[in-house]
Image (cartoon, helix red, strand yellow):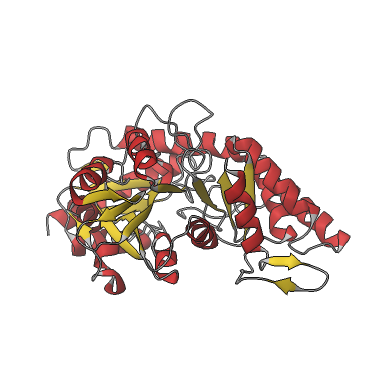
Amino acid sequence: MKLSVPHIDKNDIKSVNNVLKSEWISTSSKTVNTFESKLSFFCKTKYSVALNSGTSAIHLGLKVLGVDKNSEVIVPSLTFIATVNPILYLGAKPIIFDVDCYHNLKVNDVINFIKKKTEFKNNNTINKKTKKIIKVIIITHMWGRACNFSKLKEICKKRKIFIIEDAAEALGSYVTRDKNNHCGAIGDIGCLSFNANKIITTGSGGAIITNNKKFYLRAQYLANQAKDDTFNYIHNECGYNYKMNSICAALGISQLKRLKKKIAQRKKIYNRYLLNFKKSKNIELLSFDKKSKTNYWMNILFFKKLNFQKTYDLSLSLAKKKIETRRLWRPLNLQLHLKKFEKFNVKNAIKFYQNSLCVPSDDNISESDVDKISKYIKKFYEIIINK
């Protein structure tokens, strides 16, 4: 039983075949424009830019917001490496913060840092320690669990700090139960991913969503190799080959139609895990803020009494039963190339990383599958804890 795999049905194949038959498979196809329009409609944003990956979306978002070698960007420790690497592409430096009980950025820590460790000067927020401009905060909505950052947003507006939402795992999640608050649509720029393991897929791919026309036009321009004159091939600055092609877009259009159905199925899976571990004192299922609405993309179990090695042993035991599990993303402050950067009170992220596993959350697993998985987890947990 797999964590989360792509599911391609006959409608997906038909949609892709139609594009292939048209022979219009490039990034400039009307199919790409259609996918962008449908994304904007679903997320309730004015604009979307379909790209070749979620990493490209973050890089482009940072570039559009003016991040450079004189900038710093605040990031959560518990996130995929693609959240932070684009900061380094631009010569900027990350500041790494801890996460809360839902694995999202610990917003109050960031607020306290801004109030106590920075100064507002010449219309910029300056880090007192490094004297660099804090240009952007990246909010990652981990595992589809929405991060409510309304208080932080108010402060950022006053302090001229931009917000990028890394909603790579959160298509179909909402910060509040109001459907006008889709993850990625609340900050200045939102970044989505349609990688093979996401709730919908385009094979590979991502997108920027925004309500700011200036940011949208700039992102489209840079993603298209910064073309100023397409006939004479004039490029007045460095651009990128980041646009999504129409084959991927055709798959995305078809997949998007099934998103609500997929979320409903994953909700059933979550609720079954919740039922199975409700009475367990030492195994906890990752919850979510009940004021929000989640897409239930990935289920996470936390094992109170296991250490790093024993969590790995549990995973190996489950693998022998063909039950796929994996650790959480390794905290950024533990990554070799990131250890030198500033960090603040990172404790929860390390604890969750050591003692947690992602468990099968795929659309196609049944409630009886969840029962079987849960039974083996409990069985192997008891064996390992008593060794």
Q: Is residue 228 above or below residue 114?
A: below
Residue 367: percent from the left, percent from the top? 45, 38
* Residue placed most toward the observer, 153 or 190: 153
Question: Residue at horizontal 26%, vertical 58%?
Answer: 314
From the viewer's side, name the closer residue of 246 and 108: 108
Considering every residue shown, the one lying at the far left of the view is 386
Q: How many marks?
A: 0
Image position, residue 277 (x, y; %): 28, 37
Specify whether residue 4 is in view. yes
- Residue 11: x and y in percent read 75, 47
Q: Residue at x 57, y 46 (%)?
A: 209
Image quadrant holding the C terminus, namely bottom left
Is residue 41 shown above or below 245?
Answer: above
Q: Nearer the viewer, residue 156 or 169?
A: 156
| Residue 243 visible, this orientation | no
Residue drawn at (68%, 64%) of the image: 224
Q: Is residue 276 left or right of residue 24?
A: left
